[in-house]
Image (cartoon, rainbow, N blue to C red):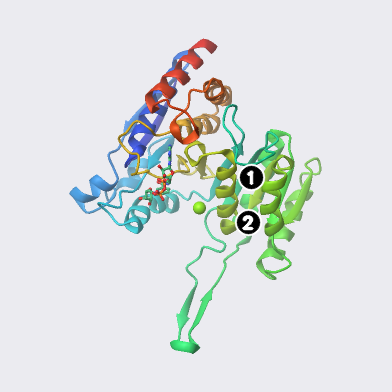
Amino acid sequence: MKNFRIACLPGDGIGLEVMSAAQDVLQTAAEIHGGVVFDFTNFPWGSDYYVENGLMMPEDGIRQLKEFDTVFLGAVGNPKLVPDHISLWGMLIKIRRELELSLNVRPARVLRGIDSPLHSPNDFNFIVVRENSEGEYSEAGGVIHNGPDEIAVQNGIFTRKATERAIRYAFKLAKKRGSKVTSATKSNGIVHSMPFWDRIFNEVAAEYPDVETRSVHIDALSAFLVTKPETFDVIVASNLFGDILTDLGGAIMGSIGIAPSANLNPEGKYPSMFEPVHGSAPDIAGQGKANPLGQVWTASMMLDHLGLPELGAAILEACEEVTGEGIKTPDIGGTSSTEEVTAAICSALRKKA
Ligand code: NAI
Ligand code: MG
């Protein structure tokens, strides 16, 4: 029996509802597998914790998380209780930085029974690998002078280490998927960092002669994701470009409530963190309307990472059987509740056993 220790941070709002749903699905997956145990430890960190303790998570929270195999997060934020910049920086960003989660990986594909807003989604199925630690999102720079002479300088930071790490991960992933790699660039307009990015992309590509590659400028790439998304497999992008592409990916899937993500520590030094793309949705919290698919698909990615890809795939297939039958929450045009969708996924999984 293999035991996996999973630190669960449901967070706030619908985070609590979708976490409980995903735990049910994971327990059902463990049952049908027979050889694994998922040992969940729930931490009550988030906005309520802040109101009581003045912190989003305890001082030694990161040390506690380091003891686990993975971290599984719902969503954080309750703007009525805590300003968003505090809830974001006090927990999510702290975890991403201190566990050195330098890559953000987000798949985007059409799930059976879910309408994409695109006219011709053509069963697209791609995955964006975003450099998550530097690039355009840096604190290097400043503002000087006042009035008409005011000047703002914002520096992008591109290190060989982080650039190569993201690109290399994309190639490994492409090799595993038997697919090609597209690099998001803008070397025609950004004349230092992007030619550097291209150079490293070409160096790494030379080590993978059997993987097909192309570089596409980010503006054209964004347009192609709308007009011919089916032509992409693995896309590797800098922090800003990846941020934009992943939101676009979520949008063309049909609802933010289904989009999953992984924040990876590629060296395996610390646990990686898995979280859906959506936030705590205070507008629907506590009403049983939250779509659990984003959290459940995220759980499936977590199982891939834990070396249980068949079980991860079984979960995603069960989700598609359920959406295919029209058992869906209101955000994707259904009338079912969070609990009904979750129960349907669990029973679809049991049928596979
Ligand atoms: P949001 O993602 O929470 O909600 C945006 C819209 O999508 C809302 O109308 C919501 O009802 C809907 N939605 C989101 N997830 C859904 C789901 N699973 N099922 C059905 N509908 C869903 O983003 P918003 O409203 O900008 O932020 C709300 C709070 O969440 C804020 O405090 C924000 O800081 C936080 N947030 C946290 C994130 C995280 O924990 N990773 C990410 C984004 C926002
Ligand atoms: Mg974003």
Q: Is mark 1 within 8 Å of ligand 2?
A: no
Report x, y in % for residue 68.
Answer: 39, 36
Most extreme residue toward the right is 209
Q: Nearer the viewer, residue 314 or 247?
A: 247
Q: CA distance from mark 1 to mark 2?
A: 10 Å
User: Residue 112 falls in which quadrant of the image?
Assistant: top right
- Report the quarter where the N terminus lies: top left
The three-letter amino acid code for the residue at tag 1 is: Tyr
Element type at mark 2: helix
Element type at mark 1: helix
Q: Nearer the viewer, residue 70 or 13?
A: 13
Q: Nearer the viewer, residue 257 or 98?
A: 257
User: Residue 115 falls in which quadrant of the image?
Assistant: top right
In this rendering, position of residue 280 left or right of residue 197: left
Give the number of the disc on residue 163: 2
Q: Residue at (39%, 34%) from the top-left corner?
A: 290
Q: Nearer the viewer, residue 241 or 209?
A: 241
Pointer 1 with pointer 2, Cβ within 8 A: no
**Where does label 1 land, which residue?**
169
In the image, is residue 18 above or below residue 279?
Answer: above
Report x, y in % for residue 126.
Answer: 65, 40
In the image, is residue 81 above or below residue 157?
Answer: above
User: Residue 37 falls in which quadrant of the image?
Assistant: top left
Q: How many marks?
A: 2
